[in-house]
Image (cartoon, rainbow, N blue to C red):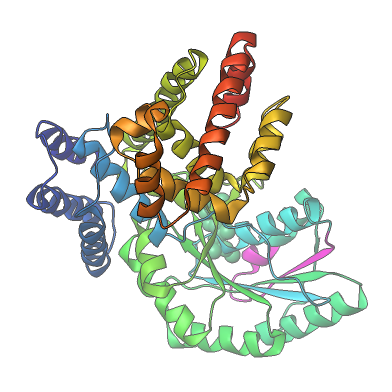
Amino acid sequence: LSDRLSGVFERLTKQGALSEDDVRTALREVRVALLEADVSLPVARDFVRAVQDKATGQAVTKSVTPGQQVVKIVHDELVHVLGGDADDGALKIDQVPAPILMVGLQGSGKTTTTAKLAKRLTERDRKRVLMASLDTNRPAAMEQLAILGSQIGVDTLPIVPGETPVQIARRAKQQATLGGYDVYMLDTAGRLHIDAELIAQAAEVRDVANPRETLLVVDGLTGQDAVNVATEFDDKIGVTGVVLTRMDGDGRGGAALSMRAITGKPIRFVGLGEKMDAIETFEPSRIAGRILGMGDIVALVEKAQQTFETEQAERMMKRFQKGQFNMNDLKMQMEQMLKMGGVSSMVGMLPGAQKMAKAVDEAGFDDKVIARQIALIQSMTRKERANPQILQASRKKRIAAGAGMQVSDLNKLLKMHRQMSDMMKKMGKGGMLKKAMAGMF
Ligand code: GDP
Ligand code: MG
């Protein structure tokens, strides 16, 4: 996949601009690549369409090649579809005891994941957890949970031979209540394939326990099957989240994308090995990087964007030190202020900037006013912005009128500009400016 995409984007980088056709050509290949990563066909198709819409008409960041830009757009869209921000890993424990139901096919990693989560709840959330195995078909599976429980120091419900899963669920609930547990986890039986009996049993258990969370455990390596399983379980049982196991393997994790896109269910955790600590909260950006296999380019674009901004800031700083602080700079500063949460934050950041605070005060400079100041600067010509000292009465009148304001407003702006300019020059000599600016970019 990675090779294929690299090829496509290399071709793109050789072209000057990113035309609609270029995007389309690249995305046709992305679609194939997604399919190779086990993303299901309709999901891949929808995904590509969304990226096409987003990429078309989008500006290419300076100093970044069009091809690299496409990679970044593809990556960002992947992250978006996968759920955006990382899951906070908090399970819903809003009653005592809170039942958590674990479902999934046999061998998906249910028992292992039950124990991993129990350990997490015990250690991180300081919860008292009781685990119960409902896998009555396989005595060894019940033993397995008991063994894991003693390994991680989490209680398991004693095994009573001959009980049905529903009977065990009832006993677990009772035991959790009487024993003062915060959480009880029900590790259900699985089968190799989804069937009516499996679903019926899980539904019965669900009705007894009334779980706060129903986590579907899915083998992250199974690809398309995983999506069918997820859809079926969700339709019949109702799941609150998905755990993808075996993400420590070689698979590209395309199932994550399909699963999320088709079921809309959040992926909450990923299993990363057989050890009891090998579980992490789901991080869309990490999985996106893996599906795309082009983390290097994404990082490169992000770095380029950052570098570009830093270079811009440094160039600006050099000019400020020489006293070249013009209206364009002021405008940029004000836009930055708006972005960073207003005047107060900026004044707080500039050490020893009482003078400016005063200027800001005198100009009646609150957040709402900033927009008006920017409008004034916008109504200046390029030449006026670069050399505000040329502003005479007639120019001032024109500028103020153009922004729908008074000349007195403009004078306030000019005064502030002079004061800031002086201050920049002084601070530049003492090396203070560099410090102050470091906080701003
Ligand atoms: P269950 O039948 O759904 O309960 O599945 P198990 O929990 O018994 O797991 C089946 C096998 O998969 C065991 O050997 C586990 O150690 C292994 N396993 C579970 N989760 C992971 C994982 O995230 N990564 C790896 N590599 N192996 C796992
Ligand atoms: Mg099991």
What residue lies at 56% left-to-right and 16% top-to-bottom? Answer: 425
What residue lies at 24% left-to-right and 44% top-to-bottom? Answer: 70
Does residue 304 show up magenta in the picture?
no
Query: Which portion, as a residue range, is magenta?
Result: 127-143
Q: Residue furthest top?
A: 429
Q: Is residue 116 above or below residue 196?
A: above
The x, y position of residue 407, in whole percent, is 47, 47
Q: If the picture is divided into quarters, which one holds ligand 1?
A: bottom right
Res 176 quadrant in image? bottom right
Using residue 49 as the reference point, say whether residue 24 is left or right of it. Answer: left
What residue lies at 22% left-to-right and 59% top-to-bottom? Answer: 48
The x, y position of residue 86, in whole percent, is 55, 54
Q: Nearer the viewer, residue 292 or 51?
A: 51
Res 66 quadrant in image? top left
The x, y position of residue 387, in whole percent, is 37, 26
Q: Can I make out residue 252 in this image?
A: no
